[in-house]
Amino acid sequence: MEGDATRVMIGVNESTIKGYPHASISSRGAFEWTLHKIVRSNTSGFKLLFLHVQVPDEDGFDDMDSIYASPDDFKSMNLRDKARGIHLLEYFVNRCHEVGVQCEAWIKKGDPKEVICHEVKRVRPDLLVVGSRGLGPFQRVFVGTVSEFCVKHVECPVITIKRSADEAPQDPVDD
């Protein structure tokens, strides 16, 4: 029956406060909203597709104190990054199995805006759900929002789920 299942892609990322493997507030919110408002009790009617985009470290100083003596040293660094992302996805996959919803999860590297749009084009989900931090206009100028970009550029309906006010950290840029 998978051919008949409605395929919902959910963009997920790690918490900026707790770091890996914790999901961000808005990712968890988007997922829980999807479960309770879209899937509801019709678990066999849906397949959830979790995409986590790892952003390459812009300044390259993530591994400042590391010593690289062989090509294997770089491989282990890449494996560590991948492992962090896998643990993040594990949370969502485990929750899907608890409630009986089919799912797939995968990791890509790059700019989340571009990667999500590319993956939507490649995978062709029926719907994209993304969390939103609910930033004000001033913060949006500096941070830019993945959700706004996706609404404008992906080729499927997009639902953005705002964090509830009681979940927002002191600094709204944090998630």
Image (cartoon, helix red, strand yellow):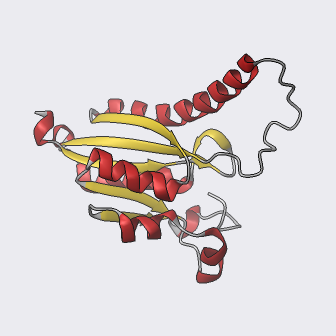
In the foreground, 101 or 147: 147
Q: Residue furthest front?
A: 71
Figure disc tally:
0
Is residue 52 shown left or right of residue 123? right
In the foreground, 103 or 41: 103
**Position of 86 relative to 58 (above/below):** above
Q: Can residue 95 be seen from the camera position used here? A: no
* Residue 3 in the image, given as x and y percentages of width and height: 12, 38
* Residue at horizontal 42 percent and vertical 58 percent from the top: 130
* Residue 1 in the image, given as x and y percentages of width and height: 10, 33
In the foreground, 117 or 84: 117
* Residue at horizontal 36 percent and vertical 57 percent from the top: 129
Is residue 161 shown left or right of residue 155? right
* Residue at horizontal 37 percent and vertical 67 percent from the top: 153
Q: Which image quadrant: the C terminus?
A: bottom right
Q: Which residue lies furthest to the bottom in this view?
A: 137
**Position of 80 relative to 70 (above/below):** below
In the foreground, 63 or 166: 63
**Position of 52 relative to 78 (above/below):** below
Quarter-of-image position of residue 5: top left
Quarter-of-image position of residue 151: bottom left
**Position of 171 relative to 13 (above/below):** below
* Residue 69 in the image, given as x and y percentages of width and height: 84, 19
* Residue 74 in the image, given as x and y percentages of width and height: 72, 25
Q: Can residue 127 be seen from the camera position used here? A: yes
* Residue at horizontal 81 percent and vertical 44 percent from the top: 61
Is residue 50 shown left or right of residue 1? right
